[in-house]
Amino acid sequence: MSEEALHRQLGLTDDEFAHIPELLGRDPNEPELVMFSLMWSEHCSYKHSRKLLRRFPVESDRVLQGPGENAGVIDIGAGWGLSLKIESHNHPSAVEPFEGAATGVGGIVRDILAMGSRPIALLDSLRFGELESSRSKHLFTRAVEGIGHYGNCIGVPTVGGEVSFDERYEDSCLVNAMCVGLVRADRILRAAAEGPGNAVVLIGNRTGRDGIGGASVLASAELSEDEDRRPSVQVSDPFTERKLMDCCLEIADEGLFVALQDLGAAGLTSSASEMAAKGGVGLDIDLDLVPLRETGMAAAEILVSESQERMLGVVLPRDVERVIAICERWDLDATRIGTVTESPNLVARMGGEAVVDLPAGLLADEAPLYDVPVEPQPISAPLGPEELPSEPVDLRATWLEMMGRPNLGSRRWIYEQYDHLVGANTVVRPGGDAAVVRLPDGIGGVAITTDCAEVHCELAPREGGMATVFEAARNLAVVGARPLAATDCLNFPNPEKGPTGWRLTEVIEGMSQALEALEVPVVSGNVSLYNESAARRIYPTPVVGMVGSVDPEKALGHAFQGDGDAVVLIGYGPRRLDGSEYLGARGCPPAPDVASEIALNGLLVEANDSGLLKSAHDVAAGGFAVALAECGMPGDLGATVELDTRSRADEALFGEGSGWVLASCSSENLARLTALAPPEVAVRHVGQTGGDQVKIGLPASTVSASVTELAAAYEAAIPGALNEH
Amino acid sequence: MSRVVITDMPRAEVLDPQGQAVERALRGLGFDDADRVRVGKRIELDIDGPDPEGAARKMCDALLANPLIEDFHVEVV
Amino acid sequence: MSVAVVRFPGTLDHVSALAAVTGIGGQAQYAWHADDELPQGTSAVLLPGGFSYGDHLRPGAIASRSPIMAAVRRHAEAGGRVLGICNGFQMLCESGLLPGALIDNDSLSFICHQADLEVVDDSTPWTGDAGAGDTLSIPIKHHGGAWFGDAEAARVVLRYHGENPNGSVERVAGLANATGNVMGLMPHPEEACDPLLGSTDGRALVKGLVA
């Protein structure tokens, strides 16, 4: 095999390959070339997105750690920081959904752990093809099992997330995992290695041939028809991860880590080069000291193995013994494998000889950066009346059919496979808008959500990016929370082809404008490109994870609380069928209005702080009729409402807009709530709770269904779709 | 040194949901002749000593099998 | 006088279990699986939930053979109170301190939701003021929670009310030994001790450790 063929096989372009000797002053040897190929892959270097990501707002006076570390950290007061990060594990999950999703959870947990934080909550944002497809059924059920298996076994509650099913994800499913952790603000750990002479200690699982080349092979190229890539998929070991958590946090509590980093994509290569480059130092590693699970592993294999459940720590020489003793107490391997050096080089030795010796910064920071084509594309136009289908004759039947769609129905089948309660702090459980988790020591609570308006992003990317961020913020506002920080996972098709580069740019612009208006910084993130096959290209899917602060005693749920309460519709702007779940990806959904969004969230939080609200729920996919049913079902409570509208009946019931919320309050508080409303936001009293029927009066007709039959359709949505052959 | 294989099966009277699920799946694939499917586990280990079978039985009693729900079979290969 | 909350590798619920004991005014401290003795002053033992040893081999099997369990057995045989929750219940059955065994849910899936439990036997120290027939709302979260054994011969304390969530024989959710000082259950009373979390029905069981 010629050298030229090897670099191409490893995924480096001819130009990139030619650039290495210019930087290095010599040709790379084989292990070095493998390391370059992984570190310069899209997955590790973000070479096609890095320039665009600079647009995101990343600063606020609460940011303790912004992008660039294993996770971001935001100040939540009383000396505590909240760390957060979301990451994709899309390609591994498409190849082996159980292990792919499970190791995705494991990876994000270790990112949080690397900040010295205790993981306190997990969320998962999932996209699959429609459940009529047996392949999508398999991917979906196994990914959910894998997430549950891992999260349940490590004792971190999986409190939320979202899922939707669309033909566009048939070939490229998305599995994004988010983790939130808690850390004392003065105890945040970082990856930068420091102090020449300090010891480099590898903790956790032994190293095998798992996932070799995973980073470049799996995450940086489109998946072909040939799905036989199983050998390079990593196997998860959540029991070891839990011990790793307990052990590393114990070491961190004793203040023994100078630096800490997890081993993820590209394994030791990535961890060691990033720790060295960030600290402006070198690392000298003896590969003969790395505990191996298999015999006969070559230097390059040890350097890029993606064996899971491993962490790399830098500790003072005098603390090595103590660190290893703590690890032994947890039945974990811990081995001093190297030393921090003054030279900026990453050196790896085997059999006493240096098999790798190059400046760490070349791997970590010198990957070529590319511009993506950003030729402006036409934005989809709103649908005219003549372009809409005729109104359904039986609105009630349509409503029940909608309630039973996998995209709108109950997520119970998913979240009841996840331990969402462990830790005894889950105040608002999954099934509503944002989850609320109580924090220790009486320091309050955190509301957490993940959201994405992918169809909107496809039809009008800038507005879709804004809508994504505002939906996340609104999901926090309806539980009574003020937003603090965001993390994002940009899942896109190949940015070098078609309109994707432009859409990526536009989505980032829209998200950034919304985040700036909300004063919410992005503190961490991840990009997953090339989510397309020859036949299908995913929607632009920029998943946003957002955290907010909330008093857990005041956290609001979405369920109606009792008979005779006022049902109130709060919001602004039109609701249309364009881009809705009812109609599909056609037309152009209403664009969010920045000032109105801010005013709406402000009203919700203020009203809840003043004790005026009994429930609040985002009117999202499925529109008003689905949202109203969702408020009634948990408490088995009906409602009678009147919608005074000039819209067609299906638009009034199922149309989607940006900022609408369905709330309830006692009739005594209705006047106070209305008086609080700022000029941008309408507060409409539309009816009252009670009875066993949900009745929606429209100018020309009344649609009515019992809570029982709505719930039956809603609960059967996902199990029903899975049981159909 | 002997290689010992221990087969650990759910006892006949114990519900075996895995076996039932596999049986349903096989029938679903058209294997109508599949019947009474049981799923157990197999443990392989090396035992050094004069009575590997006896040693393996002791290990089963001490840890490897739960006699309330599992039957085990020891084979020295 | 203190409740020993035992930690094994993979134990997950020790923090909430300890908080539940202190929340009702009791004292508690952690005990370590590798120790041969319970901490000084131990008056009762709580084996909390989790995935000790990753549930490998059988849930609770490896933990039930660890050094601390010999001390737990001596404590129980001397009449001391022991409460095993979820994985702790699995350990108690594996160690023979309670009858029967826990096998996989009939759904083969992990299940996590609030469950209604019916008090069957109100004469043990574990159900407080609740009378036979009363129901308690306590979450369940497990993959291997179906109890298998002779329910006629066992001292069944709690039974799932309504639908059987996991295929447990006679809907058994929790049971005690003949003398009533050792109790195991799959539901999680430590997560039902705080009104903010929706139910305080778990307090009765936790009080059994300190009463």
Image (spheres, coloured by chain):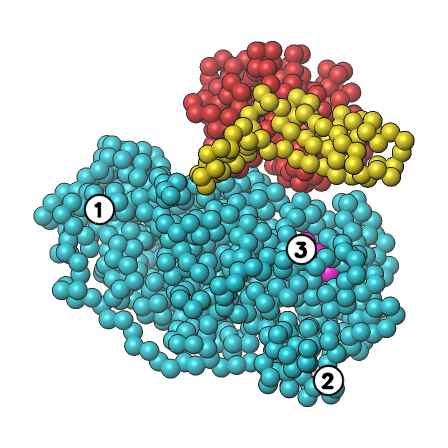
Chain colours: A cyan, B yellow, C red
Check if mark 1 and mark 2 are on a common chain.
Answer: yes
Mark nearest the camera among 1 and 2 is 2
Q: Going 30% across and 58% down the picture, which residue do you hit?
A: A659
Which segment did they paint magenta?
A307-314
Label 3 sits on residue? A308
Residues at circles 1 and 2 in contact by the CB criterion of under 8 Å: no
Q: Going 52% across and 63% down the picture, which residue do you hit?
A: A226
Q: Would you call the spot at circle 1 few (<14 residues within 10 Å), some (14-19), or many (20 or more)?
A: some
Secondary structure mostly seen in magenta is: strand
Viewer-proximal residue among B9 and A23: B9
In the rendered view, does A100 fall on the left or right side of A715?
right
- Who comes first in sequence, dot 2 or dot 3? 2
Question: Where in the figure is residue A546, as x and y percent of width and height?
Answer: 47, 58
Question: Where in the figure is residue A584, as x and y percent of width and height?
Answer: 28, 59
Label 2 sits on residue? A27
Check if mark 2 and mark 3 are on a common chain.
Answer: yes
Q: CA distance from mark 2 to mark 3?
A: 31 Å
Label 2 sits on what residue type? Asp
Element carrying mark 2: loop
Label 1 sits on residue? A398
Question: Where in the figure is residue A155, as x and y percent of width and height?
Answer: 60, 43
Image quarter of residue A17? bottom right
Element carrying mark 1: helix
Query: Is A88 placed above or below C89 here?
Result: below
Q: Would you call the spot at circle 3 few (<14 residues within 10 Å), some (14-19), or many (20 or more)?
A: many
Question: Where in the figure is residue A359, as x and y percent of width and height?
Answer: 74, 79
> Was residue A312 drawn as part of the magenta stretch in this picture?
yes
In the rendered view, does A347 fall on the left or right side of C129?
right
Q: Going 57% across and 44% down the picture, which residue do you hit?
A: A149
